[in-house]
Structure formats: structure tokens, C-alpha cells
Amino acid sequence: SLTEFIILIVVLLSIVMAQCPSSEIYPTSYGLFPAVLNLATSALITTNATCGEKGREMYCKLVEHVPGQPARNPQCRICDQRSRVPHQRHPITNAIDGKNTWWQSPSIQNGIEYHYVTITLDLQQIFQIAYVIVKAANSPRPGNWILERSLDGVDYHPWQYYAITDSECLTRYNIHPRPGTPSYIKDDEVICTSYYSKIHPLENGEIHTSLINGRPSADDPSRTLLEFTSARFIRLRFQRIRTLNADLMMFAHKDPTEIDPIVTRRYYYSIKDISVGGMCICSGHAKACPLDPVTNKSVCQCEHNTCGETCDRCCPGFNQKPWHAGTFLVKHECEPCNCHGKTEECYYDQNVADRNQSLNIFGEYVGGGVCVNCTSHTDGINCETCVDGYFRPEGVLPDSPDPCQPCSCDPVGSLHETCVKDEKHAEGDMLPGFCHCKTGYGGEHCNRCALGYTGYPDCLPCNCSVEGSMNIDPCVGLCVCKEHVEGENCDRCKSGFFNLQQNNPKGCEECFCSGKTNVCTSSHFTYRNIEDMNGWYLVGISGLIRVTPKQKSIGGRQQLSINNVSARKVLPQTYYWSAPSSYLGNKVSADGTSVNSFNLETFDVDILFRIISLSLIGGGDLRISTPKGRIHLQPSEVHTEEIVLKPESFSLHGTDVPVSRRDFMTIFANIKRILIRATYSYGMNAIYRLNDVSIEAADYSSTGRKLASPVELCDCPPGYDGTSCEYCWPQHRRVNGTIFGGVCMPCTCFGHAESCDDITGECLDCKHNTGGSYCDRCLPGFYGDPTKGTAEDCQLCACPLNIPSNNFSPTCHFDRSHGLICDECPVGYVGPRCERCAEGYFGQPLIPGGSCQPCQCNNNLDLSVPGSCDSLSGACLICKSGTTGQFCERCADGYFGDALDARNCQPCRCHVNGSISEICDSQTGQCECKANVVGRQCDMCKPSYFWAPDKRFCIPCGCSALGSMSLQCDISGRCICKSGFTGKRCEISRQVPKLKESARSSQQIRVPPRRWGFSSASGCPRGAYQPATLPETFGLQSSRGCVPCNCNSFGSKSFDCDGNGQCYCQPGVTGKKCDRCAHGFYNFEEGGCTPCACSQFGNNCDPVSGRCICPPNTIGEMCDKCAPNHWGHDIVHGCKPCNCSFHGALSSQCDLNTGCCYCRPEFSGDKCTECRSGYWNYPQCVACQCVLSGTDPRSCDTDLGTCSCVNHTGQCSCKVNVEGVHCDRCKSGTFGLSARNPLGCSSCYCFGLTTQCSEARGLIRVWVTLRPEQMVLPLVDENLHQSTLSGIAFQPPEIVANIEQVMQILRSEPVYWRLPEQFEGRKLTAYGGKLKYAIYFEAREETGFTTYYPQVIIRGGPPTHTRIIVRHMAAPLIGQLTRHEIELTEADFTWKYYADDSRPSRVVSREDFLNVLYDVHYILIKATHGNIMRQSRISEISMEVAEGGIVSGMTPQANLIEQCDCPLGYSGLSCESCSPGFYRLHASHGGRIPSQSLGTCVMCQCHGHSTMCDPETSVCQNCQHNTAGQHCEICALGFYGIVQGSPEDCQPCACPLSISSNNFSPSCVLEGPSDYRCTACPPGYEGQYCERCSPGYTGNPQTPGGSCQECECDQYGSMPVPCDPATGVCTCKPGFTGWKCAGCEHRYARDGMKCISCDDECTGLLLDDLDRLNQMIMSVNLTGPLPAPYKLLYSFENTTQELKHLLSPQRAPERLLQLAQENLDTLVTEMDELLTRATKVTADGEQTRQDAERTNDRARSLGQFMKSILQAAEAVNEDAIRLNETLGTPDKTLEKSFPELQSEADRMVTEMRSKKLNMQERIAQDEFKNAEDLLNKVKKLFGEPSEKNEDLKNEVWDKLANYHTKVDDARDLLRDAMKKIREANHLSAVNQNNMTMVEKKKQAVEDGRKGVEKSLQEGNEILNEANNLTNEINLAVEYVESVADKIQSMSDQLKDKIDDLSQEIQDKMLPEKVLQAENHAAQLNESSAVLDGILAEAKNISFNATLAFNAYTNIKDNIDEAEKVAKEAKVLANEAMKAVRKQSKLGKET
């Protein structure tokens, strides 16, 4: 147990005025940060690719190839890193040199890999990066790239992603794009943007990446942001060059090497400048970080007393507070430790700071600085105390030079040499320097005996105890004990007392012990400290409203504060701090040292003079408080108030009555509340603060030093516990909660709870699945007998299994006869344990996971017949009468109607005689009639026909046209005849004779006379009467029902009686027949009875003897008391029995006056014979357990929280939409059980699509409000015809409208505010929420014609079901702000429809209310209320809606929102949306149900090629299988086919082949059922599939890699006909030859455009001669000894080829000149640019020169100034010398002024010495030198380039020729390479096909091998089985052979016996008997078959009791017959066996 001794230390910092504090109180300080510099200029930069690294390469600018862009110099340029020309080199260092140069990457002409280029910057140390700016040069900005950072150059992390399009952010980087200008949500957010990847500008574009600005903590960077922006390495990882869209398409379909180089040369990266804005990382403690020339790193110049490379720690001696990085708002300066000048060393300790033990230099215990190496014998955290053996005297401060002095303790009397070190260590009456004495010693130095001891230095105890005796000197005289002390030496407390103390006048305190014992002792506990500043709040004295204060940590201490303005909004003028639970509960303590400290601080301008108050509230609302006191405070003063926790320190709250010790201990046994007054000022704007509250509590586990002797330890009796017996044992209760004198009784919880309620005895926290007031019932879902008292009393219900998926009943109970019975089997389940499916349901609930589902039989099952639906499979077996089919889906034969919807199948009832068949039309019911029969049922003959029963058909009536009224006849065939006609057919004419009427005779009926007379009153004779009702049996009576009176002749006055049969009695006689003595009479005899003489007994006597007796049921000598269990004493009639119920009454005795019995809590009634309201099932009377929210409130007592129920069933009276025994669940089709709903649950709306729903879970209420930018709202008229913003302004916090100005536009009232768009649209989740606003208006009159218009108008709903609903409320008052809070439900019947005549109509239904919220068109709030309006205001507009979230105090759970069980295709809380894969088919007009007004959700019509479509337009999305179109109904471009829903619908176009190299048409169309035609063959291709070349083209497009090329026939040498389409050979004109006809034939020569013959007189002869020479040469035998001159021929051939090359057109001199001219023009242009740059540089140089000259002039002037200073100094010096010389001349004037001159001279010398001229001179010289160096540098920079230009020019001219040569060579090589590539591609395709064939063959071989292996394995298995079979056969053969020998002998013997037996059988006629047995066996088989059939019929067709009984009878008869047959067969068999045995026996004997 725990007994606590309390010390409350409460620190209140109160009353801080709300004005802004002065700078002296809150000094403003900020962190220091170095300037942001461009760090890139000094970084090391590298890249993995630069143009011209591998040699010269050409590039072109993209801007010069874009249409519409001005092209100044469209020629391309050269990049060569090895060039001596600077502008041809573009190294990476150009990007950071700050000049107008740039870095450039290789173009993608060199390869596609040059999309991927990386640039890395090494800043050489870690910096804080603020921004990165990248400037492009002569190309667009990069497309896709990543900006990355790293601290070590190994691990890189992204800063930002850049992409060409937003979609590439997702596809490439898997990051959602950030559209528009980059923005950031988190400090370390990495975004992806396409903002800086646009194609424009084509050059000089910039990319700005801000890493700090725009992020959440930019103004005061968080640690996350600082870490995010720290980097040493920065990497730009380019991944895609930005290209034009047209070129992008080209790149996507072609290899870059196949694209014209003019395209690929213009795509590259170029960077002009990279700027990295950053600053040194100095942790906010330095404003500069200069470069250290030694380390070449920037070094922080730390301030704020910080040290370290990055100012990341406090300097030595400045560790009072922990180091923190400085921020933009707080500088976090390191504070020096307060060591009182005794040391300069200290460190920070967080534990010291948490305990507030370190004193700072401002005198506050804030921080954790701990001083080390204290000097001057000092010690402690602040060197504030002394080391052991020294002390600081009182009044000496710790900062004194030598504060500590040595102790002087007497070694005899002191415990040790250490004395009290200072005032802080002093306890009690001790002072600094006092020694710690041994027991019996005293004095400052322990050098004498203490009081009560004598005989120093031995100091022995005196006779008398100092604590317990009253002696002045305990060592003198007899001991005189204090009042509560005893003993010879007065050293012990008397019995019933404890805690002997010297300062207690009575010696000991009286034991409290809660009044249960007087035996107690002092505890040996020590105190521990409790402190908790969490959970405090502010309350009024009632405690009903709580306000949570603000909480913050200051110097490691928690401080609470409250602003009086905000508190007074909900609290009274005086309010209190209320302590949390850690300070409450059992805090029993003794009198003594409990202290409260109140520290008050104020910045108020008034002086405080208020009352201090501390209140404690205990059980039973017993309340005590401190007496009234006053404090006097100055502004900003801190006050401490101490209150001792003793009874005398308190009084009863609100009185001056002192608190008794009993009340004091009772409160501390269970403190409910501790209130500390918070308000101490009249200032409204005050701020109250609370700092620290601590409690010292005593318990056995405490390790404190202070002994808790005032705490009593009581010897408690059994059942009681606690130090003061204030507790009860576990499973006991304190009756009525009484502490003092209270009784502990065992709880009646049957071992299922540890505690129970002290007042009611109800058990708390029942365990073991029990519940009820006494844990005497099993919880719902469990069963058993909890009163047994074991943990296993209540077992989990198994209905039918105990697993959740198969436990279908929420409750069950145990029946002794039937075992476990489940109480609430759901619909579809039956059986004691819900183990079977009900009729109409199927399933297997006994299998885990199984359940019962409704049979899918269209509600047409005949549930009255068992087995109508198969209980396992759900098959429909017996349909309702008139229905049939597999699912009972149609009407049966002989029935007609609608079996599915209307379910009204009815019999045809075709007339048996009039119809051909009993079957009618299944829809109309029309029977098929015979001839001449009509009617639906064929039950009528045609007109003029009748039914002939004998012939069984309708025959003609045959009525005479002359004699019949019509041609119709009756059913017998008789016609209706006219007058004068007769006959069946009216065919006979006749006359009608006249008949005479005969007069009728009359008769008289005679009544017999009466036989005897009657009395005049009742009609009965004398001695009889006529009763109101006759008795059931009676004797003779008169004819009028009279009954004899039968009056007693002795007791009656006559034999007559009255009408009720009461006879007239004699005096003293009573009874209806006057047959007994009345009360008070006896001795019945003739003439009456005798009076009793028993007046004292109420005239009660024996009716025979007259002896006096007591009245019935009375006792006592005078019969004046009721007997036990009787009541209502009456001296005459006695007492009446109580008849109290044995079950319901507490006892058999009732109230003696009223007779009412004393009922148990569960019973009621006068006799306790009925259950009390809220209980049922008399006599058990168990609680109804009705759920209040679902029960009819008329049957409930809301104060008690109970409801009544039906006595025999426990059924509560449920609301309309609630069901269940306890009214705890909503009916099907409803949801949301709510106490506020009069129906209990709301009907499922679900737009009419389903009736099944539940209340949505996981939703919270949030507020929709005006956005910050929505400053004003428009005003509109009632019908929204006009709208205006004129005259409307925002005056925070209200929107104000000048109505006079508004009405100039709107012109009619009423006028309404229209809420903005966030209050419109889909607002179904607003149902159940609230619409709030505040309205204010000013008008001349309060009431006008607009007053009666609705306050709120809402229009909404689907287009076909638009509704306007309105809400009327009481009009606001003029000049008063009125707040409206409107519930968005129809429940309160306040919403009305808005009729056409502008008058409210009927109330809004739930369906229409939800329809409106489905799509809110607008919400209007009335602005005009009175007459002659001047102004209207609105504010505080909000509307509650629901969304998913976590429930909290600020976001409550959203109720009343339905979650519908939507059918297929619908989704949303109310099925208001279409599911994915469905779209809305809008209705053309409003339907009858809500879903029809929205339209139907139908499946997306995408022809099976997509599952998604737009839910509104039905356009399909993501068409697959190569389809396209709004409904995927056509094939995509490049595919053909008919879309029919198959994945193979669309096949790729093959034009003529499907491979990309031979598919020349991008599109094709279907032609015929399965063919297609290519529709976009390019020029040169033709045919259906582009399969052949057009005339004028050659090639074979049908071979892989083949294409059509234009014929290149020479226009002069070829005929005007196409070339050969296969070979491309042209048809040459005469004289021309070659494939292209570009050459001349033999003996022809080219002359311009013709080939002329050479066979003329001159040339022809020469040619002939050459031919002859050729023949001669050819005829020479070269195989002889002379070798052929091959070498010479080869040289001739080479020379010829070389000449041919030199004479080619490309090498023609004019071509060379043209190229040279172009190159020269380029060079001139570049020279012009260079000259321009040189001019600019020269101008810059001139400016620099002028600056240098100005600097030089300033240096010269400074030098001259220095010289003048020196000259002046020399002059002064000379004057001084002369002055010294004149000092020796006697002069009175000089003598008088000498002191002045001396002082002046001294002043001048001092001034000269103060001027540090040497430093100025050195600075001037350095400036002069720097100026000269700058001038030389300018000359060098701008002089040398002009000289080099001439050399460069000559060099360029020299290299032009070589350049052109190499270009031509490169072109030739490129042409050959292209040819090789085409050949390689062709071979690659062939190889690919071959590889495919090889793979297929390989796979076939592999499959064959596996098949062979499998066959071999099967063969082996068969072979093994064959071997096993062979072995078995061999064994069998051997066995048969061994047996064969034995069989022969046995066969002979058997044959003999058979012969003998046959003879015997013939003799005894056994064959006939066997036949009889066989016949009986056959009959038995037949009976068995009959039994099987009957049994099957009994199993499957037992439809009614009669069939079942007949089946049972048949079974029994057949069984009996079978038994009889079996007995006969058995007899016959026995006879046969006997005969066989007999024959066998005879055989053996013979």
C-alpha cells in the first residue's frame, strides 16, 4: 500500500498584459550568416564528353535551321579541342570562367550515346547551397536531366528532375510532375518539372533552381532543409537533348547514322555559365568566412562565443546552454557558465538542466553548465558551495575572493569533520558552519551535551524523554509526561496514539485509522518527489467547462499559460488551475510539513492586492480551502506563498468553520480535485502562468533521506488495508463509500471481478466473459452458469461452430434438457444451434466458411412443402403452384401470367367441354377453344349457339325469326318467344285463355288464456324473482324465467326477495338467503341471532358459543397487533395477509399501514409480483437491456436510462425502423441507429438501386469555408435573374453590403447572398452536417414584406429531378449579430418545397433532400430582412461535410451517412456513381425512381477491347488489341480487320511485309471479308500491298531490306521509257551504253549531249589500226621466255585512275575555288566577330587602364599627404626643439604658461604617436604596386591577341587545302560504309530467319528425345511387370501341379457321395422344395425392390403426413412378409442340410 505525504510546490507566473513586451524584456537577436557567393568560379569541374576531343567535328546551330528564324550566318562551324584557335575549343572550364565562352558536348552525329553526358563540380569543401543557375549557349536547354548532390562524391542524391513533358516525369522518373513554375511543399521535396525544358528559346536559355526560397522553412531553415542543401559535389546528369518534334519523330524511327548529318549535327549540349550560389556552413554563428591561403579553404570567423571549423560547438567556459545552430530568427549565443570567478572551465549536463540546478550569470536556474576545477576550496555545479571540511558563512556571497573557511568540529561530539557548507545545505535550525553532532551532543561545534543529556564528554541520556516529558530540565526531578505520552521516562505514546514529537504539546497524535482500530505506529517510510506538468487545465468552481492552457518549455522547465481574454469566453470571472490525476486519489498524510508555494509574476501596470486560494475537493463533494489571505505585488514581481497542509490550515469552503481531523483525512483518502486560483488581477488582458507543482509522497519504496514519521501504520482488522485502513481488501467494497467508520464487505461477484461499487455493490470490470450487476450473467455470445465461480463458467457460443465465420447467432443459452440453444438465428438458419438452412435457403453452415444463401428460385418456391429447395446445392425442387422451370422462372402448363416480376401465375381454368386442351397461352391465358366456342376459358358458345350436353359441342339455337324476340337462346336452347308464339324455337302460334281468380279464405288463431297471475314488478309470482341471466341448470320455473328465492325461514322476514335474489333478513342475520349470523352476533336460531358481549375485541365472538375471540390475523393481549406477515390492523376485521412474492420481496413482512411489500431492485407492484420497469420474465426479472437509441421513448425512463419490455419475451418496444429483442439493430433497408431519429433508423435511399445499406464508417466531419481570396460574395435576386458585386466590401471579419447601392442594380427584394462554388456540386456527404453563418443588418424598420421570405434557399438535383427547398427561421433583430446553425437533414420537418407561387409547400422528404444534395446548384442566404434596408453583413460561413480520416476532438465522427450495398456497375456511398468499366446512360426524362433520374449505369461498350470508358461520355479509354475509335470499334492505324470482340480482330498491315524495313504504307483498309489494301504507298510503290515498284523505279519491295529506287537513267543517253523494274538497266539510245546509258559504245565518243561515231576517215582508220595491233598483241604467246610487262601496265592503270580522280567534277578547279571562297567568307565573318570582341576587350582594357590610373593618382595623392604629414611632424619637432631651447630663458610669462605648454606638447606627441603612419604608407605602397601589376596585365591581355591574329590568319589559309581534301576522303569513306551497312543489315535479317528455323528444329529434336525417353521408361516398366507376372504364373503352375495329385482321389470319393445324395434327393422330393425356396427367394427380391422404392420415395417424396404414413405401413407389411418368407426358406434350408448330413453319415457307415 501507499501512504503519501504531500508537498505541493506551485509556481504561478501570472498576469502578463497583452501589450507587446519591450526590447529589454525580450531582446531581439538573429543568427549570423556569411554572404552568398558564386562557388562555381573556384570549383573543380569535369565532364565525360566534350566536342572535338577525338578530333575535328562540325556542328550547326539549331536556330539557323528553324523556319521563321533569322539566319545571319547559316554555315556550320568547327569544334576541335586540339586546335590552336581559341574559339574552336569549348572545354568544360568555359562554363565557370565568367567569360562569353561556352562548353559544348559532341553532337549526336557521333552517336546516340551523347544524349547521356555528365558534368561534375567539386567545390572542395561542403557548403550550404542556395541556388543553381545554368545558362545555355548556342543550343536549347537540356531536355531530360537530373541535378544531384553529394557529400563524398560517391553517393549522390537528387535535388530536382527535369523532363521535356509532364508525362515523362512519370514514365522516366516515376515522379508526379509539378505543373507550372516550380513550387515546393516540403523542405526536402524532390520535384520533377518541365518548366525549364521547353524548346524556346533556341539559345541563351536559363534554368533557375532555388533550393531554399519557396520551401516551408525558408525564413527559418529547419535541420531537414539544412541537410538537404549541404553539398560538396554537384552533378548535372543530362539524359536527353531537346529536339524539334519533327526531328524527334525521325529519331524514333531511324538510326541516327541513317539521318542526314545536317540534322544530327545540330543537336548537342552547350553551357555558357554555371552559377552555384552558396555560403560557408558556419552554423549561423559567423558573418564572414575568408579564404585561407594555406589550406585554400574558406574558414568561418566564429562569433557568439562559438568555436570549431564550422562554429559547431561552444568555446571553453561558455557551456551554460547547449550549443544550437543560429537561425534567421534566433542567434542561440553560447552563454558563459557562472562559476563565481573560481574557474574558467565548465561543461554542459542535460540532467542538471532538467533539474534546474545550474545558476546562470543572470541569477536564474536556467541551463546545465557544470564548473570543473573550482579553486579557493569551492565546489558544486557553480562553485557555489565548499568542499568537505569547509563552509561559507552566512552573508558571504559565492563570488567573494575567499568565501570558504575551515570547519571546527569537536571530534568527540561530531559525526565527522564536515560541517554545514552553506545556507542551501542548512536544515531546520542549523546554520552554515554548524557541525553534525552525535546523539546526545549539541552546540555549533558539537562541544557540549544536548538537551536531555548530561555529563560531557560522555553525554548520557537523562531520566526523562525530551519529546515526551513536560520537565524544563529532563535531567532534574520526576518525569511529568505529556497528555498522550506514558512510560516511566515518558518515552512512548499511549495506546491509540503515535509519532512522539518534541514540538507537539500533547506529545503524540491520535490514531486515525479510519475509525477501525486504535493500534498504530509511525511509519519508517521516506519521502519521494512527484512532479507532472502535463494534464493541467482551467475550470470554474463547478468544473463543468475545461480550457486547456498553452504549454512550452523554458530552460528545461514546463510552463503553462492562459490568456484571460480567451479564458473568459467560456469561464467565469474567477477560475482555477485544476491538477491532473497524478496529484489526485489517495494522498493520506499526517500533519506537518506539507507546503504549497505560489510564485506570481506580472507585467501589469496595476499593483495587485488579491486573495490567495487553494481548494481541495474529496468524495461526496466535501470541500476545504485555505483561509482568505492577501498579497501585494508590484509589476513583474514573483511571489511565493507557502501553505502547511494541516487541518488547522484549512476551513470548510465558503465558511470560517475549521476542518476536523476526520474531514481532513477523509478528503486526503480520495482527493477528487485540487484547485489553485488562477486569477489575481482586474486586468482583462492579463496572462496567467503556472510553472512547477511538486508533491512529496511517502511509501515503502522511496529512497529519500527525510523520514515520514508523521505517517501512521495501522493494525487493520481483516478485510481492511492501507496505512490508515482506508482501503478494502481485493474483492471487497467500502459500503456507501464511507471512509471513517465505513464497513468493508465482500463483493458478490462469484470470483469474476476484483472490485465492486461502494454504493450499489455492482461489480466493476467483470472478467471471464461475464456481465451483469453481479457478474452473474454470461455476456452475449457466451453461455453457462457464472455462479459456479470458475474462470471457465461462460463458454463461447457455437452456432453452430465457435469460429467467427460460422457463429451466426449473437446470443445463446444452456437448456438442461436440450443443451446449447442459440437465441437469434438469422434469417435463413434454423435448428437449435442454427446448424441447418431454413426452407428456401441452401448451404452448409457446419463447414468452416459455409453459410446459408437464398435459393435462386425467383421467390417462387412453395415453402409450405419441406424440401422445396435442395438444402445443399440450392436446386429448385418444388415451385409454387403454377410455376415451373429450373429456377421456377415460368408459369407451368395449365397456368398463365408473369412468374418473374408480378409473380401472378394463375390457373387457365379452360372449360373441359369447350377447350381442346387444359393448356392456355402462357402470357394471356387464352384457352384453345373448340368450334363455335368463345371466351378466355372457352366457357361460352358463340352468339346464336347453345351447349348440347348429349353432343358435347355448341349447336345453333335455330330461333324462329318470326316468333322469337331475338336469335339468342338460353343454355337449354330455348328461345325467347314473342307474344302469341310458343315452342322451343318459338315456331308455334297460339291463343292465351283468360283465368278467373278465386277468393282466399282467412283464418283466426286463438291464444289460450293465462293460467296464473304475476307480480306487477317483475312478472314473477310471490317467492320468486327474475335474474338478469339464468343459471346454467335450474328446476321448475315459470314461462317467463322466474327463479325461487329459497329464503331461510329462521333468518328471513318473509319468503320474498328483491330483484337480485336477496332475502329480507332478521336483525343480526346476514347472507343472501339470511342463513347465518352477522359479525358481532351468534347463536343462529328462529327469530335471528344474539349480539356478542365483546366490545373490547371489536365484537368478535364465536358464532356458535358467543365466546370472545381476537379478530383474524391479530396477536397481543388486546389483539392490538397484526400477526407476522400481515398488515392493516382493524379491531373489527383484524389484519390482512401481506402475500408478498417469495421471489420479488426482500422479506415476507409488508408495510403495516399500506400493505406494500419491500421489493428487490428488479421487482415492483404492491406485492412485488411483477417486474419493475426495465426488467422482464417474472419471477426471474432480468434486465431488458433495451438500447435507448432504438427503443420507443414512451416506454423508457430517460433519467434512469432504462426501458420496459414484454414480460414473457423480453421484447423491447422498438421504433418503427428498429428490430431485435433489445431494439439494437436497424431493420433491413434502414441504417444509422440514432436516439435523435424518431424512427430509430433512416431508410436506405441509394437512389432506389438497392434496399441494403449500413452506416458509413471511417468518416469525419470537416468544414467547408470561404477561401482567403474570396473576400466578397455576390448578391442576387430570388430567381437569380440578376447578380451584383457593386456596393459589397470586405471588412474583416465580415462581408458588408450597402443595400442602397445594391438595389440600384437588383431593383427588387428580397436579396440573397450566393455562396461560392465550394459549397456547390456533389454534397451527399453534407447530409447530417450543419450549415452555419452569422447575419447582421441595419434597417429603418425591423419587419418588412421580405421578412416572411425563406432564410435559406437550396436548388439542386439531377437535371430531370431538380428541386428547390427552403428553410424558414425567426428573423434576426436589427443591429444584433445572429448566428444560425442549420442541420442538413429532413428530420425536423423544417425544410419545405418551394412552390411556383413563391409560398412554402409541403415538407421535404428524405429522398428529395438527398436528391438536392446529389448536385447542389446554388445556396442562397437572405440578406434583406427589415423595411428600408441600409446595410447587410454576413460572416462565419461554413458547412460540414464528411471525408475519410481519424476521429479526434477536432474532427468528430460523421453519422447519418449511408454506405449502400450497390449492385453491379454502381459505386459511391449512395450508389450515385458508376463503377469503373461502366458509364451513365442518361434518361431522356425523369423516371419514377431516383436512379432513373440519374440514368442507368451500363457496361462500357468497347467491343471487348477495353474495360474502361469515360463515365459520362462512354468514350472508351486505353483501347487494346490494336483498336481505336470512341468505342474501340475500328482498327488502329496500321492494322485492318473487322472488330468483333476477339483479340485477333485487327491484324497488322503488311505493305508488302510486316517488318518495319519493308512496310511502306502506314495504313491500310479492309477489302473483302479477309483481305486488305494498303492506302498510303509512298511514291515509287504501287499495287494492292505496295508490293511492286512503279514505272520509273526499280527494286523488289517483297524481299527483306528491298525497296524501290528511282531509275537514274541519263536523260540524254536513255530512251524515254522506264528502266528494267528488276535490274534497273536503262534502255539506251543508239551509241550509248551502260546501266544508266551514261557512256558511249565502242567506237563512239561523247560530244556534249550525244555519242558520235568515231568511224570517220581519220579516227576510224586509227581505230582500225589499233584493233589490228590489239589482235597482234593478243596473238603473242606470253607464256614464253619473255615475261609480260604487268608491272608497267599496273603503273599505267594507277596513273590513269589518279588522273581520272583529279579530273572529276569534285576536283575541278572551279569547284576548289568555290570552296575556298566559302571558307574565306566564313573566315572573314569570324574575323569580324573576333574584331568586335577585340574592340570590346580593348574598351574594357581602356576602362581598366583608366581605373588603374585613378588608383595610381590616389596612391600618389596619399603619398603626398603622407609626406605633408611627415613634414608637419618634422616642423612640430623643430618647434619642440626650439621650445626646449627657450625653456632655459627666464621669462615670467613663460614660467606662468609652462604647464600649459607642457600639456600641449604632450598632447601633440600623443597625437603623433597615435597616427600609425607606417601602416598607411605600407598600404599605399601595396596599392601602387597592385595598380602597376594591373596595368601590365591589361597590356599583356589585349596586346598579344592583335599580334597573334596575323599568324592565325596565315595558318588558316594554309590549312584550307588540307581541309577540303580530308572532307572529300571522308565522304567517299562514308558512302562505302553506308553500302556495307545495308549489306550487313540484309545478312543480319537472313541470319535471324535461319536462327529462328534452327531454334524450332532444335526444339523439335528436344521434344522427340523426351518422347523417346518416356517410351523407353514405359517399356521398362511393362517389361518389369511382365517378369513379375511370369514369376507368379510359374508359382501358380507349381502349386496346381502339387494339388492335382490330391484332387483325383478326392474326386472319386466325391463322385460316389454325389451319386448317393442324388438318389436321396429324388426319394425325398427335395428338388420341388428347392424350387419353392427359389420362388420364395424371388419373392424376397421383389419385396426388397419394393422396399427400396418405398424407401426412396420416403426419402425424396415425403411431401405430406398421409404419404409418409402409407409408406411406413407398406414398409412394415413388406418387412413382415419378407421375414415370413425368410423363415420358410430357413426351414427348407435346414431340412436340406439335415438330409445332406444324414446321407453323409450313411455313406460313412457303409
Image: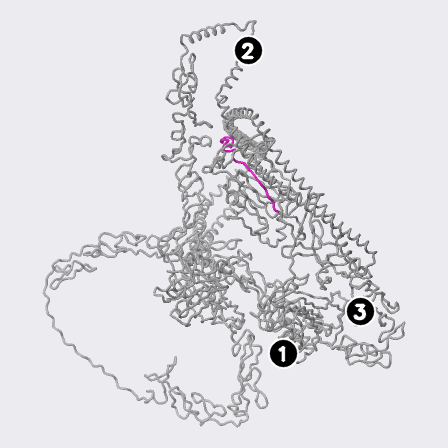
Helix, strand or loop under label 1: loop
Display coloring? one colour
Instruction: Residue 718: tell me if it is visible.
Output: no
User: Which quadrant of the view contains residue 296?
Assistant: top right
User: Which quadrant of the view contains residue 1414?
Assistant: bottom left
| Residue 654: mark in rendering | 1
- Measured as percent of width and height from the top left, residue 1284 is found at 41, 60
Q: Which amino acid, by three-letter code, is at mark 1? A: Gly
Label 3 belongs to which residue? Answer: 394
Tell me the residue at 13%/58% (across/down).
960
Label 2 belongs to which residue? Answer: 1688
Picture layout, residue 1318 above or below residue 1094: above
Query: What's drawn in magenta, residue-wise?
Result: 255-277
User: Which quadrant of the view contains residue 146?
Assistant: top right
Q: Earlier in the sequence, mark 1 or mark 2?
A: 1
Measure the alpha-carbon separation of dots 1 and 2. Answer: 142 Å
